[in-house]
Image (spheres, rainbow, N blue to C red):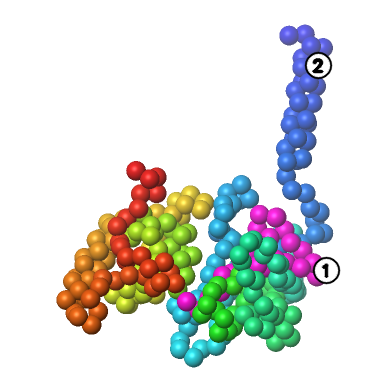
Amino acid sequence: MKPIAMKLLNLLYAGGLLLLVTACEKDLPVFSDGECMLNFNYGDNLTTAGVRPGMGVGSYSFKLNAQEGQMRDTVWLKVNTMGKLSKESRPIALVQMEDTTQGVINAVAGKHYVAFDEPGLAALYQVPGESAVAEVPVVVLRDASLQQGNVVLKITFGDNGYFKAGYPEFATYQLIISDRLSSAGWDKYMLDQYFGAYGPQKHELMIKWTGKTWDDEYIASLFYEYFPGLYAPKDNAYITYLGKWFAERLAEENAVRLSNPEIGEIWKEKPEDGGGVVDFTPIDPYGY
C-alpha cells in the first residue's frame, strides 16, 4: 500500500476510535472530580444495569426482632461514596421522601423513627476519613399503630455541601417498619416455590416449630445470590426437606386439633388475613 493511502487509512481509523470513545463517554454518568456523592449499597459489585425492583427495600419487624416491651431498635444501612476521599470525617444528610404509591402509609418522624436531624444522631451520620464506605443508623420506634399495619420510610441523601445523591438507581432506600409478621423476605427469596403462599399464621408456626425467626436475616442465610436480584438455596436438599417436614408437622397438628372438641378445626389464617387454610404445598413460579 502506498504511503499516502496508508496515512489516510490511519487517520480514518484514529477518527473512528475518537468517535467511538466520545459516544461511550456520552453514555456514562458525568460528575466532576470535585463532586462527592453517596449511593446506598444494594449488593457488592452491583452495577446500575443490574438493579432490579425490590433491591433497595428492607424491613424491620418489632414482633420478629425485638424483645417484649422493647420500644426502639436500630437498623444499619450501608452506603458508598463516589469522588475523592478525604482525610477528615464528613457528615451525611439523610432525608425522608414521601412514597406516593397508592395505599402506602408513610412513616412519621418522632412516631415511627427518630428524625434524621436529631442532635444525638449527628455524630453517627459520618463517613470516616480515608474511607469510601459508611454504615448509618435508622432508629425505629415501636408505636402502637404498627400492630395494625406497616409504614414505609423512604430515604434519600440531602445535599449538605459535602455530599449529594449519586446514581438515581442507588439513591433511595425503603424501610418497611411493622410490629407484626412480615412477608418481605418471603417475597424477595420467592419462598412460595418451596413452602407455598405466605400467611402470618403459617409464619408463626414455622417460628414455633423451628425456633428460628424466619426474618430477612435468617432467610438470607439460607440463600445465595447467583445473579443480581436472583437467589437460590445454598443447600437445595435441606430446603426441600424443610418443606416436606413442615407439611408433615402441619398434618400431625391438624389431626390433633380435629380430635379436640374445643378446637375442632385445622390451622387457618386469621379472618383479617383472609381466613385461608394453612398449606405448605409448593407453588411453581412458572405456573406449571
Give neighbour class at mark 1: few <14, some 14-19, many 20+ (Cα, 10 Å): few
Magenta residues, as a range?
Answer: 153-180
Q: Residue at x 39, y 45 (%)?
A: 286
Query: Helix or strand or loop: what does disc 2 sit on?
Result: helix
Q: Is residue 57 above or below residue 144?
A: above
Q: How many marks?
A: 2
How far separated are the C-alphas under marks 2 and 1? 50 Å
Whole-percent x, y for residue 88 in the image: 75, 74
Q: Which of 136 and 138 lies nearest the eye of the viewer?
A: 138
Q: Which of 167 and 181 lies nearest the eye of the viewer?
A: 181
Q: Is residue 186 above or below residue 229?
A: below
Whole-percent x, y for residue 23 in the image: 75, 35
Which residue was labeled with disc 1?
161
Which residue was labeled with disc 2?
8
Q: Residue at x 55, y 88 (%)?
A: 71
Q: Residue furthest left?
A: 259
Whole-percent x, y for residue 128 in the image: 68, 73
Whole-percent x, y for residue 30 in the image: 77, 49
Q: Amino acid at mark 1?
A: Gly
Q: Amino acid at mark 2?
A: Leu
Tell whether position 157 is magenta: yes
Placement of the C terminus among the 4 image quadrants: top left
Q: Residue at x 29, y 71 (%)?
A: 267
Q: Is residue 253 above or below residue 85?
A: below
Give neighbour class at mark 2: few <14, some 14-19, many 20+ (Cα, 10 Å): few
Q: Is residue 151 above or below residue 71?
A: above
Residue 123 visible to an observer of this rendering: no
Asked whether, in this view, residue 195 is left or right of residue 142, the answer is left
Q: Quadrant of residue 100?
A: bottom right
